[in-house]
Image (tube, helix red, strand yellow):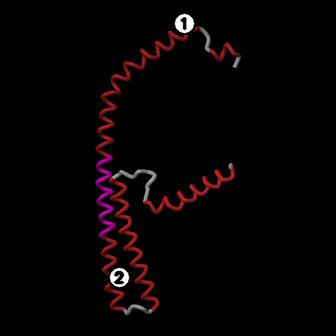
């Protein structure tokens, strides 16, 4: 009975390992727009680079003549440059967004930092008063 249960569990685990990629489930639950856009751009870059490698390989094998090779190379170089430019522009937009958020956090920290500076000395006084009331710490009592 136990062997049957173990066999069934192993079978289910194996089935999940096989079916998981086929179902298209995503563990991370990628809801990020940024990763979707950058993933698409990097896919275009990879495709253009692979196409350049392929036509170069075909040319070296003799499957393409000089004229076809030059035309295809120009076309795929243009695609690769467009993809790189799009990625660069998107990175610049993201950098600007990060800078804006950082500036907002710094200004928020400055505003809340003034209140925190006044609260910190009173908290230190309260801790010192509590220690004075309760005597030595637990570590000292235990001899640690």
At mark 1, the secondary structure is helix
Residue 113 point in image, percent of width and height = 35, 27
- Viewer-nearest residue: 128 or 28: 28
In percent of width and height, residue 36 lies at 35, 57
- Residue at the spot 34% in from the left edge and 22% down from the top edge: 115
Q: Residues within 10 Å of mark 2 (few under 14, many from 20)?
A: some
Please identify the residue farthest to the right as the structure is shown.
Answer: 143
Q: Quadrant location of the C terminus? A: top right
Find residue 4 and report its horizontal and vertical position in percent: 66, 53
Magenta span: 82-98
Cα–Cα span, label 2 and label 1: 82 Å
Residue at 34% across / 86% down in the picture? 70
Neighbor class of circle 1 (other Cα within 10 Å; few <14, some 14-19, many 20+) is: few
- Residue 139 drawn above or below residue 61: above
Image location of residue 109, percent across then percent down: 34, 32
Q: Residue furthest top?
A: 133
Front one among 102 and 59: 59
Residue 110 vs residue 22, the one in the foreground: 22
Q: Are marks 2 and 1 in contact (CB under 8 Å)?
A: no
* Residue pointed to by mark 2: 73
Q: Quadrant of residue 88?
A: bottom left
Looking at the rendered structure, the number of numbered marks drawn on it comes to: 2
Q: Judge whether 88 appears above or below 119 on screen.
A: below
Q: Name which residue lies at 40% across and 83% down.
A: 55
Q: Quadrant of residue 11?
A: bottom right
Q: Secondary structure at mark 2?
A: helix
Say which label, 2 or 1, has the lower sequence index. Answer: 2
The verdict on residue 136 being magenta is: no
Please tell me which residue lies in front, 74 or 32.
32
The secondary structure that dominates the magenta segment is helix
Asked whether, in this view, residue 8 is left or right of residue 40, the answer is right
Q: Which residue is mark 1?
A: 133
């Amino acid at each position: 009975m136990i062997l049957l249960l173990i066999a069934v569990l192993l079978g289910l685990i194996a089935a999940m390992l096989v079916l998981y990629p086929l179902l298209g489930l995503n563990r991370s639950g990628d809801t990020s727009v940024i990763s979707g856009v950058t993933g698409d751009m990097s896919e275009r870059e990879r495709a253009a680079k692979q196409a350049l490698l392929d036509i170069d390989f075909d040319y070296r094998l003799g499957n393409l003549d000089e004229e076809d090779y030059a035309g295809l190379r120009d076309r795929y170089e243009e695609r690769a440059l467009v993809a790189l430019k799009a990625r660069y522009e998107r990175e610049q937009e993201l950098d600007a967004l990060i800078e804006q958020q950082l500036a907002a956090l710094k200004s928020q920290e400055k505003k809340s930092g003034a209140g925190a500076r006044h609260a910190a000395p009173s908290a230190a006084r309260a801790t010192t008063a509590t220690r004075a009331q309760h005597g030595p710490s637990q570590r000292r009592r235990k001899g640690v």
